[in-house]
Image (cartoon, rainbow, N blue to C red):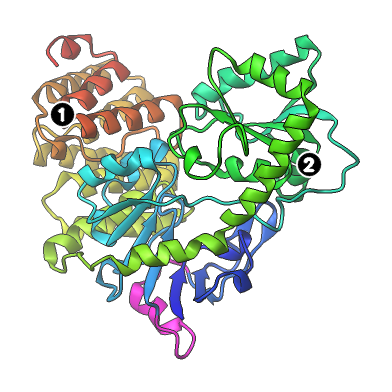
Amino acid sequence: MVKVLCNLPLECFDERTAMPGIELCTYGPRDRMLVDGTHFPFDVEFDPSTGTWEQLLARLPRGFRPDFVLVWWPDQEPLPQGLQHCPVPVVGVISDWNLTLPYVAGLWPFFDLLICDRGGQELFARLSFAEVRWWCQYAHKRPFHRVFPVGGRDIDIGFGGNLNPVVQRERSSWLSRVQALGERGIRAEVRGDLRGAAYGRFLSRCKLGFNRSIRGEMNLRAFEVPACGAVLLLERDNLEVRDFFVPDEECVLYGPEDFEATVAELLRDDARRERIAAAGHERVQQYRLGRRLPQLVDLVAATQIRRLDNATVDGDAALGRAEAMLSTWAAGPAATAAAVAATRALPVDPRPLNTLALANLRWRGSEGADAAHQLWRKAIAIAPAYVPAAANLLELMRATGDPALVRAARDELARRVQDASTFADIDGPLLPLGFSERAIDHATALREAVLAGDPAVFTAAVARSFDLAEALVRT
């Protein structure tokens, strides 16, 4: 029996009785985990944003000592302080790295194994993570995703999910194509307001379930649609779908040139469509999370503990934890405390000062502006080519409306954009926090810079973001 300590109640995906050979213990705040409108309690009440690894260990049930720790979505869930000293393998599962890369790039000191989609493997390997593997983290949630008795499939093609055009840039244009099918007499529905059983009932009314991934991954919807008995429609260039479904037998793939024709053909041929839907529904049962967890256990069994345990790594770990907490649910005081710990561990490093300034603004809003200003000034003085502090200071000065202050901050950033030459010069989150269009542009630029091995790719994006035409000429 393999004992797994996890920060996500995996029974939101599958029953514990369906996890053969695994004894699961979960931890988290009492009221934290609301999944699709349903609360899934933790075994151990523990707040990782304020607690330490040693405190968590002391709260585990008598006789339970994990064989490994499974940390799901550290861009959403804070890490316990000191997790880098855990004596057993620590496995991280990262999902929306396309949005959160500036916050999670520094988490390498914590994980012996990082799980991500295929599109992220090379990226995170280049970011110094000890070992990076592909393993599909998604599955349908059995409490919600099944064929509901709704009286028939009266929707020809449906989509339910994130409709934010900033986050889902490419998908938004595709959803317009889905909705335009109505002009051809096809009943199409696009919904962004459905969760849990209501979402399962919606898919149970659909003949076809539209899907388009954001990173070429098998996302949640790729399992949810067939689980609810609809035909899965997914982009032809998806990197992972062929590992799970046989195209034209268990799902249907489309491209820009044949999407409408593919939909029309499926709707004309009831027998073919129903055959594919039934085969996909049968196949997806093999991919319930309980049946795939043994694959993850096998990956961990082949993993060595490669985290280094010294003062340098402790400082990097404190910084990585503080940066990542900025994008999680952690309260302002906890995120600020983590940043303070990072500044103490790395007293002559501009990165924790940048993070502490951001944490102050995140917690106190405009009341934290003075402290943030002083911290960014100090970071700028420490490192002559460090870009994030200068970019954030310019953003702060813009809020003052003072032309002289804006001009001085702009000149400082323009110089640094030209002088930055190492990844240490661009390492750190930028304002605005969250997932605005500009924030996503910064995350995309960071990914491109890491893959290209060239910090100038990122600094050029910063120059464009701040309209630094004179800096762009020389980058």
Taking the spot 23% from the left edge, 67% from the top edge, the residue there is 304
Taking the spot 41% from the left edge, 58% from the top edge, the residue there is 78
Q: Secondary structure at mark 1?
A: loop
Where does residue 368 sit, x and y in percent of width and height?
Answer: 37, 43
Taking the spot 67% from the left edge, 20% from the top edge, the residue there is 178
Where does residue 157 sit, x and y in percent of width and height?
Answer: 73, 27
**Position above or below: 16 against 170:** below
Tell me if 308 is positioned left or right of 447 in this view: left
Dot 2, how many residues are within 10 Å of its Cα: few (below 14), some (14-19), or many (20+)?
Answer: many
Q: What type of secondary structure mainly makes up the magenta span?
A: loop
Q: Distance from label 2 to label 1 (Cα)?
A: 48 Å
Where does residue 259 sit, x and y in percent of width and height?
Answer: 61, 17
Tell me if 158 is positioned left or right of 249 in this view: right
**Position above or below: 149 against 308:** above
Residues rendered magenta in the picture: 47-65
**Position above or below: 317 against 255:** below
Q: Which mark is residue 222?
A: none
Relative to the observer, which residue lies in front, 214 or 222? 222
Asked where in the image residue 375 lies, by quadrant, the reply is top left
Residue 261 covered by magenta stretch: no
> What residue is shown with label 1?
454
**Position above or below: 243 against 10:** above
> What residue is shown with label 2?
204
Relative to the observer, which residue lies in front, 427 or 71? 71
Asked where in the image residue 334 lies, by quadrant, the reply is bottom left
| Residue 390 in view, yes or no | no
